[in-house]
Amino acid sequence: MENLVLDPKIVWVVLVPILFVMMLINMLRTNVARLMAKTPAPPEDKNEFRDSQALLRSQRLRTNFQRIPREAFEMRRHFFTHADDGVFSREDVRAPDPMAALGGNGGMMPGMEFQIIQILIFQWVNYFFSGFIVMKLPFALTTGFKAMFQRGINLPTLQASYVSSASCPMNMTALQGVTSLIFTDPPVDSPAVSNRAPTFGTSVMTDMKKLFESEREELGLINWFSEVSDAETQLLSSLKPSK
């Protein structure tokens, strides 16, 4: 297909409103990320901290049991695995709270709010600006890019360098750089960036009861032996002069 003559008014009627809305959304995301970074994290529950430390101590015991006396090992194993009063036999272990893992935001996963806004933007563009060709890129592209740059337009013979209005929202990631010039973003290793998109399924979702049962079984399967029972003999043999 030959080159198309684009109406200059399309830029002001279609492309500029889309750019303006996308800029506002990126500014909103930047400011919300800053507000989330300034929000103090809730204090860690003392029971969760106690349970996690008990697991660490048990793992250290399984790793280094051969370096302590048998009586010391059996005393520690009894402390963790006894059926009546062992640490891993407690019944008051709290079950995981899915709502707490979602960040307490009404059952919505972290980052889902921005995804919903992105979906609304796509719907808005498709409703008001569907079917427009807004620009032509100054370089040639292969036909593999037609699905990316020509959403909503079914013209097989159209050059891939033409961009449709429905493809603008998904190809405007460069606006994040413009937004960072207007609102200085925090550094990459700052808490603001680390809190922008928290992952679903944090330590709050860990089922401590299952971990306790698994750790109790691991400790129960250990057959104690010592690596330091003949340490004196090994030391003296290493000090003997070679002939």
Image: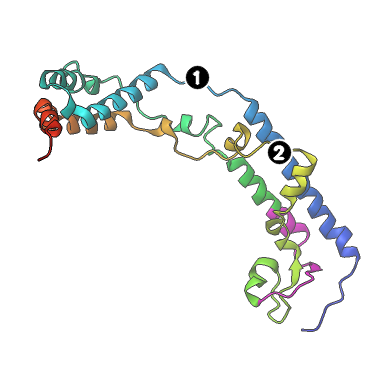
The boundaries of the magenta stretch are 122-142
Q: Nearer the viewer, mark 2 or mark 1?
A: 2
Residue 174 or residue 20, whichever sits in front = 174
**For the residue labelled by badge 1, is the local secondary structure a helix, a strand or a loop?**
loop
Residue 61: where, in percent of width, then height? 23, 26
Horizontal placement of 49 versus 133: left or right? Answer: left
Left or right: 207, with 161 as reference point: left
Q: Residues within 10 Å of mark 1 (few under 14, many from 20)?
A: few
Q: In this view, does 108 lie above or below 127?
A: above
Residue drawn at the location 69% of the way across and 55% of the way down: 122
Q: Mark 1 points at which residue?
A: 43
- Provide residue 106's location: percent of width, then percent of height: 55, 32
Which residue type carries mark 1?
Pro
Q: What residue type is labelled 2?
A: Asp
- Can residue 94 be seen by looking at this rendering? no
Quadrant the C terminus occupies = top left
Q: In which quarter of the image is residue 85?
A: top left
Visible in this render: residue 176?
A: yes
In space, the residues marked 2 and 1 are separated at their CA atoms by: 27 Å
The reply to whether discs 2 and 1 touch (Cβ–Cβ < 8 Å) is: no
Q: Residue 101 or 116: which is nearer the viewer?
A: 101
